[in-house]
Amino acid sequence: MKQRLNVFLLTDMEGIAGINDIGEMDRTAACFSLSCEKLCASINLAVNACFDAGADRVYYLDGHGGGGNVNAKKIDRRATKCSLEEWQELLKNGEIDCQIELGAHARAGTIGGFLDHTISSTSIYSIKINDMEMSEFSLHAILCAKYNVPIIAVIGDEVACKQAQEYIPEIYCGAVKVASCRNVATTDPDADRILVDTVKTALANRASVPCIQLQEPLCVEQSFYRTDMCESALANCSADVLRVNARTLQKEVQCISSYFDLKF
Ligand SMILES: [Zn+2]
């Protein structure tokens, strides 16, 4: 009997093929709708590749900036759109067999990473867990690992891909563009084929990609750009949160139960 294959696509925009300049990520710019169309086109390629590779179900999350970038009507009808909360519910309920990150970018403070940041490019300087510098990718991987769901592939800029391999060496990578500096990139003319091949190869070999290995309890440390940002975050925290310096908060997480346990 064929094993069930439910795939979750967690999408972001910075690592999407064809988005090559910081100006194209400005929600108030006229060209932003074109960037959203590029995101939809990449999602449709990935969804189709998943079904070609034998997927039973494909879910996707419009993850950039809290969502609102993807018009579900423009996405392959076989795929199901999910919120961040629904993603976590699916994980908890054992409904996801593997995850693919589409449109990924490098963590904050990376040379050569297109639009490098971690969650917020305006307030978060760094997030460390058990003394390891985190990317958005690794934060997702830690939550997925809690439910034994491997992230089997990452598609994004070249450095985002290399960085994903630092956390999970066996992961399949599709580098669709290369940054010449933080705010400018060049998309590979073969980007669509790279995306499709990466999804199909990863799904065919998914059993060879392990979950990220990290021991609980977790020590979560987040540094903000400014002292006042740290102070306002602290004001909303429980009493057991430690302010380790002017810009940094620290907490111990005994048992992860939500994505929000991994940050402040
Ligand atoms: Zn983003």
Image (cartoon, rainbow, N blue to C red):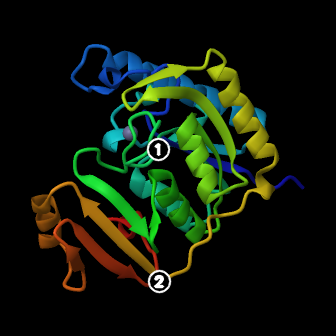
* Label of residue 217 in the image: 2
Residue 144 in the image: above or below residue 11: below
Instruction: Kindly identify the residue that appears in the image at 60 percent across and 19 percent down.
Output: 188
Which of the image's four quarters has the C terminus?
Answer: bottom left
Residue 162 versus residue 25: which sits nearer the camera?
Answer: 162
Which mark lies nearer to you, 2 or 1? 1
Q: Secondary structure at mark 1?
A: loop
Q: Which of the 4 quarters of the picture holds residue 219? A: bottom left
228 lies left or right of 127: left
Residue 201 is situated, as x and y percent measured from the top left of the image, at 78, 39
What amino acid is at disc 1? Ala
What amino acid is at disc 2? Pro
* Label of residue 263 in the image: none
Q: Which residue is mark 1?
A: 106
Distance in Å between CA atoms under marks 2 and 1: 26 Å
Q: Residues within 10 Å of mark 1 (few under 14, many from 20)?
A: many
Q: Which of the 4 quarters of the picture holds residue 63? A: top left
Residue 114 in the image: above or below residue 253: above
Residue 215 versus residue 43: which sits nearer the camera?
Answer: 215
Residue 49 is situated, as x and y percent measured from the top left of the image, at 71, 31
